């Protein structure tokens, strides 16, 4: 096994930021986090609109699940990887800004859809635009921060998942409550729309100023070792083959985790409506507050644990991820089985904290291993795998159990509990298995840089 460079040697190669560089780096974190929040608002607002969309378009739970997951995941993953190849060579700031403008336009297009096919295609367009964000953002952040601060920076960026989902509930729920009393809504220039269509258009609006602000960022210089050869994929594939166990274990462990996370989050509003008779407005308020209040502390805890344990253990990032799973898996397995809605909501607090921890550290763990000119494409491959598996299977697995196994809409809670239990155990087993392989890959990466 290769020796680990001394801590002082690593600090010389990766010095702390001066005040000006730190301000520029954290400004980038803030803007990228705002973009991530915006992306999750546009991605998740559809979960609040399941009821009216089903009624207006005459859809089943399975068809709705394709709109939540599969339609989005198709373009998010395939085109996300192609965009990431460009992000490893071209200006990442411009790529991110273009993606923001595209997904904003396509979210508004969801509101103009007149049928299932049009809505499916518009959701594919949202995925195409959002596929430009995370691979380029993670590569950019890795060049802005020293390694000892990277997990904390990425954990702040990762709060966009829970904050964006929470704001989608709070804002989306308010919009829906405002427009739900009318059969139709009239918007300037757009004419008469159904309330769910108006909700898509209204939540898309923040993307325009965020995209303009993104253009004010400075593209940082790329740092660290390079192993790529321009646009060729061959060096990336060779690197992945050499460390396949590390990448496979993290990617598929997190993929199974996202089956549970995306599947359950996509159906939580319907669970509270069907099981407890809550209105969309009531659920969006309380669950939105849970996500906004408890998601960021979970992400910050994950980043702090990862940076702290990284100094003592090569597998410190995965140790932090397993702490999160210990909270997440039992909480998600139990919340849907509660007979009281407030007890169900209470279980969502540890689930939210626990889920934010592995989400915030897994991508940072990959950035520890990737050469500098492969970071965007490796992170895109990671998002390809977790999105195809998580978004493609998660919402649909719960819908299929409800439609065909239990064959009763009222049994949604048991579909959720089944997926949570099985997926949670498999994800934990994969992350435990990968730890020694990840340790060896980390030590090799430290030797490269030392």
Image: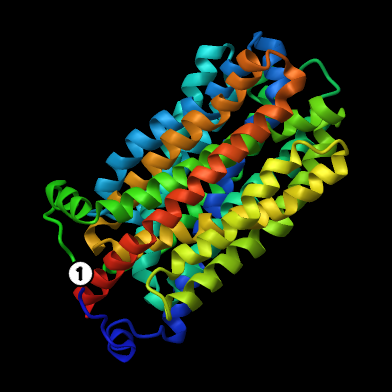
The colour scheme is rainbow
Mark 1, residue position: 225
Toward which corner of the image does residue 113 lie, by quadrant?
top right
- Tally of numbered discs: 1
How busy is the neighbourhood of tag 1: few (under 14 within 10 Å), some, or many (20 plus)? some
Q: Position of residue 345 (x, y in %)?
A: 80, 45
The quadrant of the rendering that contains the C terminus is: bottom left
Toward which corner of the image does residue 50 lie, by quadrant?
top right
Which residue is most to the top? 58
Query: Is residue 269 among the parts visible in the rendering?
Result: yes
The residue shown at (40%, 44%) is 252
The quadrant of the rendering that contains the N terminus is: bottom left
Which residue is most to the bottom? 8
Query: In the drawing, does residue 398 fall left or right of residue 257?
Result: right
Query: In the drawing, does residue 126 fall left or right of residue 87?
Result: right
The residue shown at (46%, 48%) is 254
Q: Nearer the viewer, residue 6 or 23?
A: 6
Tell me if residue 350 comes above or below residue 384 in the rendering: below
Q: Position of residue 304 (x, y in %)?
A: 55, 73
The residue shown at (50%, 78%) is 308
The residue shown at (36%, 66%) is 142
Q: Nearer the viewer, residue 235 or 340?
A: 340
Q: Position of residue 167 (x, y in %)?
A: 69, 47
Label 1 secondary element:
loop
Query: Is residue 192 among the parts visible in the rendering?
Result: no
Q: Position of residue 302 (x, y in %)?
A: 56, 65
Q: Nearer the viewer, residue 17 or 312?
A: 312
């Amino acid at each position: 096994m290769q020796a680990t460079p001394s801590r002082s040697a690593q600090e010389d190669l990766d010095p702390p930021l001066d005040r000006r560089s730190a301000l520029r780096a954290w400004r980038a974190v803030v803007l990228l986090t705002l973009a991530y929040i915006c992306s999750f608002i546009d991605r998740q607002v559809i979960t609040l609109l399941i009821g009216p969309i089903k009624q207006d378009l005459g859809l089943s739970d399975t068809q709705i699940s394709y709109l939540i997951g599969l339609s989005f995941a198709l373009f998010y993953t395939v085109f996300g990887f192609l965009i990431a190849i460009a992000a490893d060579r071209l200006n990442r700031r411009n790529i991110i800004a273009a993606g923001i403008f595209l997904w904003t336009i396509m979210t508004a297009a969801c509101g103009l859809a007149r049928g299932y096919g049009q809505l499916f295609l518009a959701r594919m367009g949202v995925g195409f635009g959002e596929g430009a964000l995370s691979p380029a953002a993670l590569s950019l952040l890795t060049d802005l921060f020293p390694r000892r601060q990277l997990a904390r920076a990425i954990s702040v960026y990762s709060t966009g998942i829970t904050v964006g989902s929470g704001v989608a509930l709070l804002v989306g729920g308010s919009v829906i409550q405002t427009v739900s009393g009318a059969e139709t809504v009239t918007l300037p220039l757009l004419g008469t729309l159904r309330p769910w269509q108006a909700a898509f258009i209204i939540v898309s609006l923040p993307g325009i100023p965020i995209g303009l602000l993104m253009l004010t960022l400075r593209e940082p210089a790329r740092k660290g070792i390079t192993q790529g050869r321009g646009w060729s994929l061959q060096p990336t594939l060779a690197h992945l083959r050499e460390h396949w166990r590390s990448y496979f274990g993290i990617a598929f462990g997190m993929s199974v985790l996202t089956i549970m996370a995306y599947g359950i989050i996509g159906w939580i509003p319907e669970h509270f409506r069907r099981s407890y008779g809550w209105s969309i407005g009531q659920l969006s308020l309380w669950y939105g507050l849970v996500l906004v209040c408890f998601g960021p502390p979970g992400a910050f805890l994950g980043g702090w644990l990862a940076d702290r344990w990284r100094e003592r253990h090569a597998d410190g990032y995965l140790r932090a991820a397993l702490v999160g799973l210990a909270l997440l898996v039992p909480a998600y397995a139990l919340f849907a089985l509660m007979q009281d809605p407030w007890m169900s909501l209470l279980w969502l607090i540890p689930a939210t904290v626990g889920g934010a921890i592995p989400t915030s550290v897994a991508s940072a763990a990959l950035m520890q291993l990737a050469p500098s000119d492969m970071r965007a494409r490796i992170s895109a491959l990671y998002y390809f795998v977790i999105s195809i598996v998580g978004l493609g299977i998660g919402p649909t697995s719960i819908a299929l159990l409800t439609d065909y196994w239990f064959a009763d809409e009222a049994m949604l809670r048991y579909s959720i509990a089944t997926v949570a239990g099985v997926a949670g155990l498999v994800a934990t087993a994969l992350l435990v298995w990968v730890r020694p392989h990840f340790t060896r890959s980390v030590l090799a990466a430290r030797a490269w840089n030392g």
